[in-house]
Image (tube, rainbow, N blue to C red):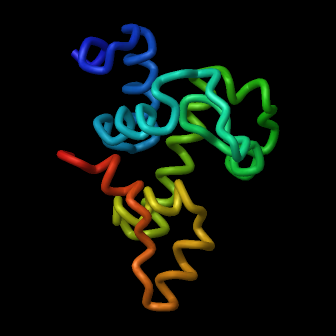
Amino acid sequence: MRSTRYSISVRLATDIYDASVREGIDPELAFRLVGVESEFNDHAISKAGALGLTQLMPSTAVLIEKSTTREELFQPRTNLRIGFRYLRSLLDMYKGDVRLALLAYNRGEDAVWRDIKAGVNPGNGYDRYILKGY
């Protein structure tokens, strides 16, 4: 059971699982992303200003769901839905390449495209951290 494996509540495990399936994200990838991004803390705030479980930047969240407020990003179900929808869009953009989608999630789409166009490896270790043993 994932709640035991990740030392989180059954409710949070259920919310992560349900949101990942609804948005077409592999549940194991979803759990890994949330674990790395926020350590399953729905009130996490990064130094850069990313919020909640999936560490969404408010500006990115508004691109995905126009009416999203900063406060809503601290609500687990809202944050998971928008975060996984964003990841799904990146997976589509990078034609299913999980590594590139994760790097874009972490670094931004522009940074990843810039590196790819320049013939530079866009990796920064983030992808390996999430995908280790995946």
| Residue at x 37%, y 8% (from the top left corner) | 10
Of the pair 127 and 79, the residue shown nearer to us = 127
Asked if 39 appears above or below 60 in the picture, the reply is above
Asked if 96 appears above or below 67 in the picture, the reply is below
Q: Quadrant of residue 57?
A: top right
Residue 131 image point, x, y percent: 28, 50
| Residue at x 45%, y 20% (from the top left corner) | 15
Count of residue discs: 0
53 left or right of 116? Answer: right
| Residue at x 37%, y 26% (from the top left corner) | 17
Residue 22 image point, x, y percent: 44, 35
Of the pair 80 and 36, the residue shown nearer to us = 36
Outermost residue on the left side: it is 133
Asked if 20 appears above or below 121 in the picture, the reply is above
Outermost residue on the bottom side: it is 118
Of the pair 72 and 21, the residue shown nearer to us = 72
Q: Quadrant of residue 13?
A: top left
Quarter holding the N terminus? Answer: top left
Of the pair 43 and 19, the residue shown nearer to us = 43
119 left or right of 64? Answer: left
66 left or right of 108? Answer: right
| Residue at x 79%, y 44% (from the top left corner) | 66
Asked if 1 appears above or below 109 in the picture, the reply is above
Residue 90 image point, x, y percent: 50, 60
